Image (spheres, rainbow, N blue to C red):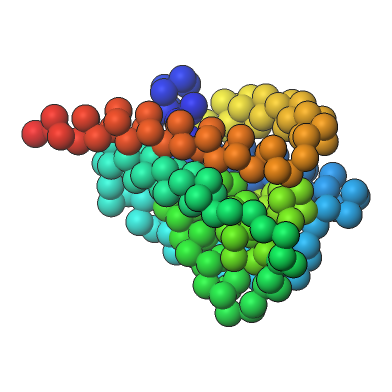
């Protein structure tokens, strides 16, 4: 979303829809590749996907209620909260807890609403949610989150298309570039342990979140 708005110059509300197509498409391909490697937790993924699909459709209805700056400010604040949570949550040697159905459904629904509302795909939300609430090991959580993201993006896109029209040629160009980046990232991820990926991911989320909050917070304060 920030790349679409600040680099490509797409209006924030339209960028939400484009983001859902790009993130959903790359996530679908990524989840299929991870399924071939056995890097999916089907039970946790199913709970998150079912509730997330419904939540994303509902969340899409509320996007138009906020200004572009408010939308991106909330996006950044959410990233700060998730990044901090991942850094503060200590990894232990105890066996991970199982995914409790009602908890996973509830978290999945919440993430789905935010996916449809902010057009974030939910990667930086679903991944830590699978690790923190469902007890999924980091590398399996990456593959599982991609499958859930693809489903959530579908629900969010269906809701968004009722309110915005997309430039499909531009969307396809971003999708193609994102797929190329995904394959490069997958090759690199296989060379690092989960204990390295987790803090690196958290710091990236925190950094971008801080920029979005500062930039858009200033815009909101200065708004008439």
Q: Nearer the viewer, residue 123 or 172?
A: 123
Q: Estimate the x, y position of residue 104 in percent, counting from the top left.
A: 60, 71
Residue placed farthest to the front in the image? 93
Quadrant holding the C terminus: top left
Q: Residue at x 15, y 34 (%)?
A: 221
Q: Estimate the x, y position of residue 177 in percent, counting from the top left.
A: 67, 24
Which image quadrant for residue 69? top left
Q: Residue at x 47, y 21 (%)?
A: 8
Indicate whether 95 appears above or below 167. Answer: below
Instruction: Examine the rendering and report whether any part of residue 166 can be seen.
Output: no
Residue placed farthest to the left in the image? 224
Q: Residue at x 42, y 36 (%)?
A: 209
In the image, is 3 to the left or to the right of 213?
A: right
Q: Estimate the x, y position of residue 123 in percent, counting from the top left.
A: 59, 47
How many marks do you count on the picture? 0
Q: Nearer the viewer, residue 89 or 221?
A: 89
Instruction: Examine the rendering and report whether any part of residue 182 can be seen.
Output: yes
Q: Estimate the x, y position of residue 160 in percent, counting from the top left.
A: 47, 50
């Amino acid at each position: 979303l920030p790349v679409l708005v600040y680099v490509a110059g797409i209006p924030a509300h339209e960028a939400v829809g484009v983001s859902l197509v790009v993130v959903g498409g790359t996530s679908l391909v990524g989840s299929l590749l991870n399924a071939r490697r056995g890097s999916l937790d089907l039970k946790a993924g199913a709970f998150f996907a079912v509730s997330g699909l419904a939540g994303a459709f509902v969340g899409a209805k509320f996007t138009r209620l906020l200004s572009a700056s408010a939308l991106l400010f909330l996006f950044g604040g959410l990233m700060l909260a998730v990044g901090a949570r991942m850094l503060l949550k200590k990894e232990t040697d105890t066996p991970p807890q199982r995914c409790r159905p009602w908890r996973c459904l509830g978290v999945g629904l919440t993430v789905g609403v935010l996916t449809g509302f902010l057009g974030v795909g939910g990667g930086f939300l679903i991944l830590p949610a699978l690790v923190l609430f469902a007890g999924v090991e980091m590398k399996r959580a990456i593959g599982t989150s991609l499958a859930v993201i693809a489903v959530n993006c579908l629900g969010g896109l269906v809701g968004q298309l009722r309110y915005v029209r997309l430039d499909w040629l531009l969307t396809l160009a971003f999708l193609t570039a994102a797929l190329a980046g995904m394959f490069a990232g997958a090759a690199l991820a296989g060379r690092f342990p989960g204990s390295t990926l987790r803090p690196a991911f958290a710091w990236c989320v925190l950094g971008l979140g801080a920029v979005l909050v500062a930039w858009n917070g200033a815009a909101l304060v200065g708004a008439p």
